[in-house]
Amino acid sequence: MGILNKIVNYVKGAQVQSAASPYTDMVISTAASLVGSAKKPTAAYKAALKKAYPNRSSWGAAAKAGRSCDVFVGTVLRTAGLSSNCPRGLKEQYKFKPKAFNRYVFHNVKPKDVSLYGDVIIYKKKGGGGHACIRGAGGIYQANHPKYYPHFTSGWKKLSVKRPTVIVWRAK
């Protein structure tokens, strides 16, 4: 990975390491502005989703409504102005690299061990499927297919399990 210039931020009393980039702040502030209750989307998220992905008519019900991790991550990056072409679908996101980010691929690791505050994390699960989320201070910003809208989850439960493949997009 080379030498990464890190800075230490203190957020709500918790020490958080982050990549030194103004894009990191854009990712986090955008994600934080769009999340709410897992059971109900915020008006800001509905508007951002409509603008980020205006042609959703052929999508399944959960993705169309924004209750999908890949759609949430794409909406955040598009809304922040960091990737106007971020695809939806984990399969497409596994291969994608937004221009404002470096892309790192890890194997057989825990996502929390290779990610920093502000990173987009995409991982594959054993047996298929996967998840995309954004690492925040003390937890993750995520949406969960098929029933949960974007929300912040405290803790590292999802990021503490060893995954076969972990992709990290880190702001340049």
Image (cartoon, grey):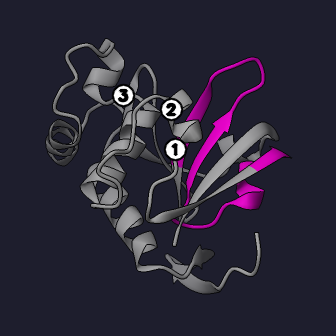
Q: Amino acid at mark 2?
A: Glu
Residue depicted at 60% across the width and 86% down the height: 7
The magenta stretch spans residue 13? no
**Residue numbers of the magenta segment:** 106-133
User: Between marks 3 and 2, how big is the CA–CA gap?
Assistant: 18 Å
Q: Is 62 on the left-hand or right-hand side of 7? A: left
The answer to whether residue 47 is left or right of residue 166 is: left
Looking at the rendered image, the disc whose residue lies closer to the viewer, 3 or 1, is 1
Picture coordinates of residue 8 (x, y %)? 61, 85
Q: Secondary structure at mark 3?
A: loop
The relative height of residue 52 versus residue 97 in the rendered view (above or below) is above
- The answer to whether residue 35 shows anywhere in this view is no
As shown in the figure, which amino acid type bears the numbered disc 3? Arg
Name the residue beneath numbered marker 3.
67
Residue 169 placement (x, y as % from top left): 56, 57
Q: Position of residue 41 (x, y in %)?
A: 25, 36
- Give the quarter of the image for residue 10: bottom right
Amino acid type, residue under disc 1 in the picture: Phe
Kindly state the secondary structure of the residue where label 1 is placed: loop
* SS for callout 2: helix
Which of the marked residues, 3 or 1, is nearer the chain's N terminus? 3
Q: Is residue 77 above or below residue 8?
A: above
Toward the viewer: 54 or 9?
54
Residue at the spot of label 1? 96
Considering only order in the chain, which callout, 2 or 3, is on the residue closer to the N terminus? Answer: 3
| Dot 3 and dot 2 residues touching (CB under 8 Å) | no
Which residue is disc 2 drawn over?
A: 92
Query: In the visual, does 1 lie left or right of 171?
Result: right
Dot 1 and dot 2 residues touching (CB under 8 Å): yes
The CA distance from mark 1 to mark 2 is 6 Å
- Label 3 and label 1: CA atoms lie apart by 21 Å
